[in-house]
Amino acid sequence: MLAAERRDHLLGLLAREGKVVAKDVAAELGISEDSVRRDLRDLAAEGLCQRVYGGALPASPAVVDYTARQRLAPDGKRKVAAAAAALLRPGGTLILDGGTTALAVAHALPPDLACTVITHSPTIAVALLEHPRAELFLLGGRIFKHSAVACGAAAVEAAQNVSADLCLLGVTGVHPEAGLTTADAEEAAMKRALAARAADTYILASSEKIGTASQFRALPWAKVGGVITDADPRDPVIGQLEALGVEILAAG
């Protein structure tokens, strides 16, 4: 089989099965595992898969820069945001992550809702200036421009001194095996720090993130209350998540 044919075969497997197991592909095609791994390295370099131990998973499309992500699945993000905003009760305290879906949550909060919002995103803070009854706390640190959020040691330390009823986190990948992932190690650490300070944590995941993975795990499934998504309930990945005991909150 030519290299181009192997490439198409691997991409087809990712689309149909949601993963590639190198040893299985090698046995199926009668080639070495080294050849499969080399093909996967090439695909990963093009952003077409996320390499993991033993093979690869579909790469998240949400690892592009902040401006590009604002144009990615805007309808899905609005649906997720509306469902997420409904979880915050009057007088409650919310830790709101950064990113484009979290920004949609900020816009979805009722303007007259009395609440407290803690965020490490200057973009979220600016959006909430229009909510007169929302108390606003901005956590500082080094600004990670890709997601317009504060990260690093100073931001993590600041997060350790707050607490909330609810935490809404964005991730770039939601996968039954890889878990909840993002593309930056410090951002993943910040998400863990924020989630640890809330009674309940829910993941904001528009449908394009379901079944995909990025490089760094943010949280294990045991640390979240559920996933808010507009993905089709019949999506096989949704079924796999529910089989793991993950609560799925449908946004539609």
Image (cartoon, rainbow, N blue to C red):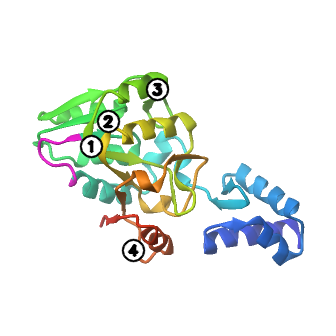
Mark 2, secondary structure of its residue: helix
- Work out whether mark 1 precedes mark 2 in sequence or the reverse, and give the earlier one: 1
Pick whichever, 44 or 19, lies toward us: 19
Find residue 233 and name its label: 4
Find residue 143 and name its label: 3
- Work out whether mark 3 precedes mark 2 in sequence or the reverse, and give the earlier one: 2
Q: Specify whether residue 199 is painted magenta.
A: no
Residue 86 at x, y percent in the picture: 20, 55
Write the residue at 12% across / 43% down.
113
- Callout 2: few (<14), some (14-19), or many (20+) C-alpha neighbours within 10 Å? many
The residue tagged 1 is 106
Give the left or right position of residue 59, taking residue 89 as reference: right
Pick whichever, 201 or 212, lies toward us: 201
Q: Specify whether residue 90 is painted magenta.
A: yes
Residues shaded magenta: 86-93
Say whether marks 3 and 4 touch (CB < 8 Å): no
Say whether marks 1 and 2 touch (CB < 8 Å): yes
- Image quadrant where one finds the C terminus: bottom left
The residue tagged 2 is 124
Give the left or right position of residue 54, taking residue 77 as reference: right
Give the left or right position of residue 191, taking residue 56 as reference: left
Residue 242 at x, y percent in the picture: 42, 70
Q: How far apart are the alpha carbons under marks 3 and 4?
A: 36 Å
Q: Nearer the viewer, mark 4 or mark 1?
A: 4
- Amino acid identity at mark 1: Ala
